Image: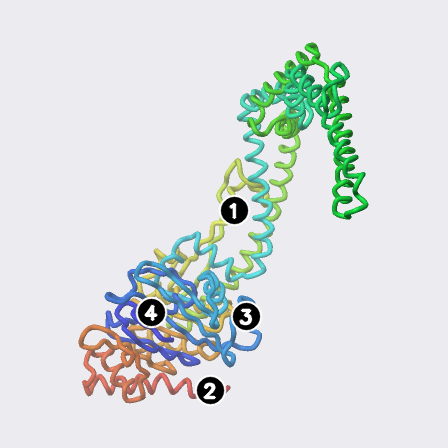
Amino acid sequence: MRIRALGVIDDAVVELSPGFTAVTGETGAGKTMVVTSLGLLLGGRADPALVRNGAGRAVVEGRITLADGDPAAVRAVEAGAELDDGALLISRTVSAEGRSRAHVGGRSVPVGLLGELGEDLIAVHGQTDQQRLLKPSRQRGALDRYAGEAVAGPLERYQAVHRRLRQVSATLEEITTRARERAQEADLLRFGVEEVAAAEPQSGEDTALAAEAERLGHADALASAATLAHGALAGDPTEPDTVDAGTLVAQARRALDAVRSHDPRLAALADRLDEVGYLLADVAADLAGYADGLDADPVRLAAVEERRSVLTHLVRKYATPDGGTAEVLRWAETSAARLAELEGDDDRVGELAAEQQALHAELGGLAAELSAARHAAAGRFAEAVTAELTELAMPHARVSFAIAQTDDPAGLEVDGRTVAFGSHGVDEVEVLLAPHPGAPPRPIAKGASGGELSRVMLAVEVVFAGADPVPTYLFDEVDAGVGGKAAVEIGRRLAKLAESAQVVVVTHLPQVAAFADRHLVVEKTSDGTVTRSGVKVLDDAERVRELSRMLAGLEDSELGRAHAEELLATARSPRRQDRAAS
């Protein structure tokens, strides 16, 4: 992973190995930026404040090796990415103005895709996650996540029925509490629908009547114009001396007919005059028919205007001016459907109440099934965490789950009780800890010391890691508040987890770092930045020096170096034995 212009890091390359990689460094050296960089690569929120002062943008690039058929590889290829010899190249750019861009396999992609890939690639566990897990609601979510499909299936069915119940209950409440408003709405709609039905408008009728009214209102002028035009074309019998257009065209045609045989061009013009004569005759006949058909009927005009007034009234009330009668008819159709719904309120109340009762019963059964699945998973989860605590120098500690319900007269009937319910069922889940024999189980936030709490949370995270099908786990200083023998056991436990997955641990404890397969140290230069050479892989001698610094605060202390060498030997000895046995 290459990091440029991110926080204190100017330009650095981080090489993470298979197995267990420890990342250490002095406070403020930039260890957190390593975690932040991984978060950005895998869809984390882009904060422009992370961009280094003076830089226009921060860039994080990563090369991730994937197994054949890995879900992340499949999803990336579906998005158009190309793999590079089985590796996926990912980059994320964050500008100082807050813009963020992502590329996967050489292809620009939405940042959301990085989040999808991240779910299949890495599980991040840190102190923030630990604090969230102290909340009972988070503990229920943790239990559900650990249980997997055993809880996910019943929970999905429960939530589907719960959503339907909320919809039915909301509709029922609206009908009953807004009965008066709905009755008033029904009265208004009924009046409008009946008014439209009584008028019986036709689509486009208003346009047709407007044209007819225009024609009837000017019938005399139209008839006079048609008669005058007819006389000009065909002659007026009352004035025999008048020369009309038809006569003139006929004269012209006869003049050309007399000589058409002498010139084909003139013959063609004579033929065209024939066509003109026929056309004039047709137009004259149509004009005569039009004039005869016109009737200045004042009774019909009054009827048309009266009908137009009715339609205009409807359009003004139930449509836009441009919508006309077609829109009035659409309004009437929609309103009739709404009216039928409102008029059926009484029937609907009965139907909805019956459905609500049935959904309550169904939801109670699903809640009981979900609760049983959680109880079964809680036993397994508690046993797994207790076993992890034994490995973490708490051999007498016991973890258990308190799964309870709260009585509520308006709730669900589950196993003979009426209890409160929500979108996640009826269970209130809380993790309890008995740190030693004879101690009563208490909520982990109250029953554990700082060091014990860190180990409990780490045990929970390790159990989660075993349940999460991802290839890489990042632990960000989850060992805070722990020291001595417990820290050694934490290092040993993380090393064991690294036998089946890639584990990256940002730590301040030398006892943990000593168990790493690869040790990275983040160092600042004299000007306070971390350059390319500032994140380095330590060899054996350098590891001794770094562990000595972490132990005693002095890199060259002979006592510190001796202690560091002993710590490394202690960490390597059981691991060699375990590998030999395997």
Residue 567 occupies quadrant: bottom left
Judge the density around disc 3: few (<14), some (14-19), many (≥20) Cα neighbours within 10 Å: some
Residues marked 2 and 3 touching at CB (< 8 Å)? no
User: Residue at image x 22%, y 84%?
Assistant: 560
Q: Which residue is mark 2?
A: 579
- Mark whose residue sits in front, 2 or 3: 3
Label 4: which secondary element: loop
| Quadrant for the N terminus in the image | bottom left
- In the picture shown, does residue 165 fall above or below 338? below
- Would you say the residues marked 4 and 2 are in contact, meaning their CB atoms lie under 8 Å apart? no
Residue at x-position 43% and y-position 57%: 431
Residue lying at the far top of the rendered structure: 299
Question: In the image, residue 267 lies at what x, y percent?
Answer: 78, 44
Which tag, 4 or 2, sits closer to the chain's start?
A: 4
> Where residue 357 sits in the image (x, y, percent)?
62, 36
Figure check: 141 above or below 41? above
Label 2: few (<14), some (14–19) or many (≥20) C-alpha neighbours in 10 Å: few
Q: Of marks 3 and 1, which one's residue comes earlier in the chain? A: 3
Hey, what amino acid is under mark 4? Asp
Question: Which mark's residue is nearer the viewer, 3 or 4?
Answer: 3
Which tag, 2 or 3, sits closer to the chain's start? Answer: 3
User: In the rendered structure, which amino acid carries the disc numbered 2?
Assistant: Arg
Q: In terms of secondary structure, where does tag 2 sit?
A: helix
Distance from the alpha carbon under mark 3 to that under mark 1 = 36 Å
Mark 3 to mark 4 CA distance (whole Å): 38 Å
Q: CA distance from mark 1 to mark 4?
A: 35 Å
In 3D space, how far apart are the residues under numbered discs 4 and 2 (Cα atoms)? Answer: 25 Å
List the residue tagged with mark 3. 77
Q: Which residue is mark 1?
A: 423
Label 4 belongs to which residue?
479
In front of the other: label 3 or label 1? 3
x, y (%) of residue 210?
A: 63, 22
